[in-house]
């Protein structure tokens, strides 16, 4: 038996949000299985406050009521974004089957569809990491507590979030163990064993792992007690090499965000107050969500020699002198899945960028008479095979348990970029109907596209590219229209009160930065790499400033 304690134990009566509902989980699960897309989403904050059926009679009555409701307009179970963004987000996660509650408060079970999005992220980044010379490996998740204590700012930054093991095998441990919150300490310990000479450098590794941080306020994908991520760790002979590495990896994340996730992040440097505990500099990509809050989507840290001095990680240089190595670490996590949901989704549900979508095209065959079924299904199968052979991720929904209208709404809610409809008339004319997820209604529907592979495959691939570009363009326009340039503290407060990002010159103190956070709820998200030319005057002090900073409320 292993006993885990936490240095900051939250209320165990809450789930992801404070709730008065802590019972009747079994009826809720039963109801969800029988009416999976009409039941209230269990992630919804509104649902969390509502009561559930107390008896099987009430359950049956509710199911009958649901079955008599309008089954076509199933997207009505998703709270409108403009009404309650958080409830909308939780509804989408539940209804699109991305994740579910874990049995421990603040944890989640990532379901296959949600995990497939994470796998797409992994597939892209794994290639990029290896192209830049990094190798995958794995470190233990149990870390001696003494390791955490070695780097002073690191232990100060992470102590409130640590989960600590005190008993193992029925006996109290001689030394407490920390369940991995991040791996700089154990990596540095091992680097000390492996690095002896300048010939051993640079050492470039990455691991895909889970981490545990005992968060008080949790949100699925965005902030949970346990989450998945990759963390890269490198050691170098010079500070210049370490800085180059940190910038190189934030560039990898930036390209991924733009080119794969269609999220127009702002890339820059964190303020001293927001820098990773134990780092010299932290670089970040900041994304604007649909509610205009900022999401820190990825970070890259120049650790300097902080950890190498704490762990005595040294090498003999070319002149025979002993030197401490220079290190970096960098990471993105399943938080990116939450970012994709909140950037692109709409009232109908998910809207996935084609490059990361588990299903890029869904084919919905339509027939009314039994003698039409075989011909329609044969044509649909041929279209599926043609697209699959061309490398398109395609799904044929040939089940006859649901109506075509139900399927349209279901796959739309799952965010599939393209829907192909094939009916008897389409079979007769050798064509299909194609609908785009990002263009609702008739405007997004095109008729009489030839089902000949030589025509159809090229058309579908072009449309997938158009959708990818369209999502990025829409998100970029939204971001740019919600960033306000400010030149005074009053203007900053006004912009933040309107829910926007404020961009203005800054050279004030850490104390002034804390004041902004206390009075507005906003923090410096970053000093962007792209800086305006010309002289600048600090919005807070009136003194000269070298850079503009971006302030925003954040997740």
Image: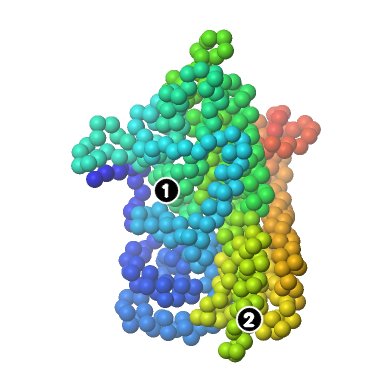
Compared to residue 99, the image places residue 327 above or below, namely above
Q: Residue at the right extreme?
A: 534
Who comes first in sequence, dot 1 or dot 2? 1
Mark 2 nearby-residue class (10 Å; few <14, some 14–19, many ≥20): many
Task: Tell me if label 1 and label 2 are in contact, CB under 8 Å.
Answer: no
Label disc, if present, on residue 376 of the rendered structure = 2
Task: Locate the N terminus by quadrant.
Answer: top left
**SS state under label 1:** strand
Q: Residue at the left extreme?
A: 170
Residue 449, quarter of picture? bottom right
- Is residue 445 something that shows in the picture? no
Instruction: Between residue 348 and residue 233, name the one nearer to us.
Output: 233
**SS state under label 2:** helix
For disc 1, the marked residue is 226
Residue name at image x 66 percent, y 53 percent? 262
Horizontal and vertical percent position of residue 98? 49, 61
Compared to residue 223, the image places residue 513 above or below, namely above
Instruction: Between residue 389 and residue 517, name the one nearer to us.
Output: 389
Residue name at image x 33 percent, y 69 percent? 26
122 lies left or right of 438: left
């Amino acid at each position: 038996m292993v006993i885990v304690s936490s240095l900051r134990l939250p209320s165990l009566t809450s789930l992801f949000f404070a709730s008065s509902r802590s019972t009747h989980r079994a009826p809720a699960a039963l109801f969800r299985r029988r009416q999976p897309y009409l039941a209230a989403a269990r992630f919804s904050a509104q649902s969390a406050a509502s009561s559930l059926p107390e008896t099987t009679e009430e359950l049956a009555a509710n199911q009958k009521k649901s079955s008599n409701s309008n089954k076509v307009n199933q997207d009505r179970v998703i709270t409108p974004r403009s009404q309650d963004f958080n409830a909308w987000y939780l509804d989408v996660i539940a209804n699109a089957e991305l994740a579910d509650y874990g049995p421990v408060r603040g944890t989640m079970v990532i379901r296959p569809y949600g995990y497939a999005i994470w796998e797409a992220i992994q597939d892209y980044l794994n290639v990029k990491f290896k192209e830049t010379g990094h190798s995958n490996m794995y470190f233990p998740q149990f870390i001696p507590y003494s390791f955490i204590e070695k780097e002073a700012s690191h232990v100060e930054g992470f102590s409130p979030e640590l989960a600590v093991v005190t008993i193992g095998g029925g006996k109290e441990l001689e030394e407490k163990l920390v369940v991995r919150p991040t791996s700089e300490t154990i990596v540095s310990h091992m680097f000390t064993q492996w690095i002896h000479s300048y010939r051993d450098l640079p050492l470039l590794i990455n691991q895909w792992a889970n981490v545990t941080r005992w968060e008080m306020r949790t949100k699925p994908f965005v902030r949970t007690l346990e989450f998945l991520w990759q963390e890269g760790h490198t050691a170098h002979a010079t500070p210049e090499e370490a800085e180059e590495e940190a910038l190189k990896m934030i560039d990898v994340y930036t390209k991924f965000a733009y080119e794969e996730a269609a999220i127009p992040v702002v890339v820059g440097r964190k303020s001293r107050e927001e820098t990773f505990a134990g780092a010299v500099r932290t670089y970040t990509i900041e994304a604007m969500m649909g509610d205009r809050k900022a999401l820190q989507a990825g970070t890259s840290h120049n650790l300097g020699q902080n950890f190498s001095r704490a762990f005595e990680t040294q090498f003999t240089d070319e002149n025979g002198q002993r030197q401490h190595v220079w290190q970096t670490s960098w990471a993105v996590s399943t938080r990116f899945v939450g970012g994709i949901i909140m950037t692109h989704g709409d009232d109908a549900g998910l809207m996935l960028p084609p490059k990361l979508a588990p299903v890029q095209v869904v084919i919905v065959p339509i027939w009314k008479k039994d003698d039409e079924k075989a011909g329609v299904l044969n044509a649909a199968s041929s279209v599926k095979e043609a697209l699959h052979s061309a490398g398109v991720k395609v799904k044929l929904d040939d089940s006859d348990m649901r109506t075509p209208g139900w399927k349209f709404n279901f796959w739309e809610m799952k965010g599939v970029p393209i829907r192909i409809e094939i009916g008897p008339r389409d079979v007769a004319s050798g064509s299909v109907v194609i609908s785009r997820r990002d263009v609702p209604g008739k405007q997004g529907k095109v008729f009489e596209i030839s089902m000949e592979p030589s025509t159809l495959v090229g058309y579908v691939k072009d449309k997938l590219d158009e959708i990818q570009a369209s999502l990025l363009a829409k998100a970029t326009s939204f971001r740019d229209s919600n960033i306000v340039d400010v030149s005074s503290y009053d203007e900053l407060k006004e912009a933040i009160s309107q829910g926007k990002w404020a961009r203005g010159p800054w050279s004030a103190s850490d104390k002034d930065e804390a004041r902004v956070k206390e009075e507005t709820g906003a923090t410096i998200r970053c000093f962007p790499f792209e800086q305006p030319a010309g002289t600048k005057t600090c919005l807070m002090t009136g003194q000269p400033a070298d850079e503009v900073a971006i302030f925003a409320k954040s997740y």
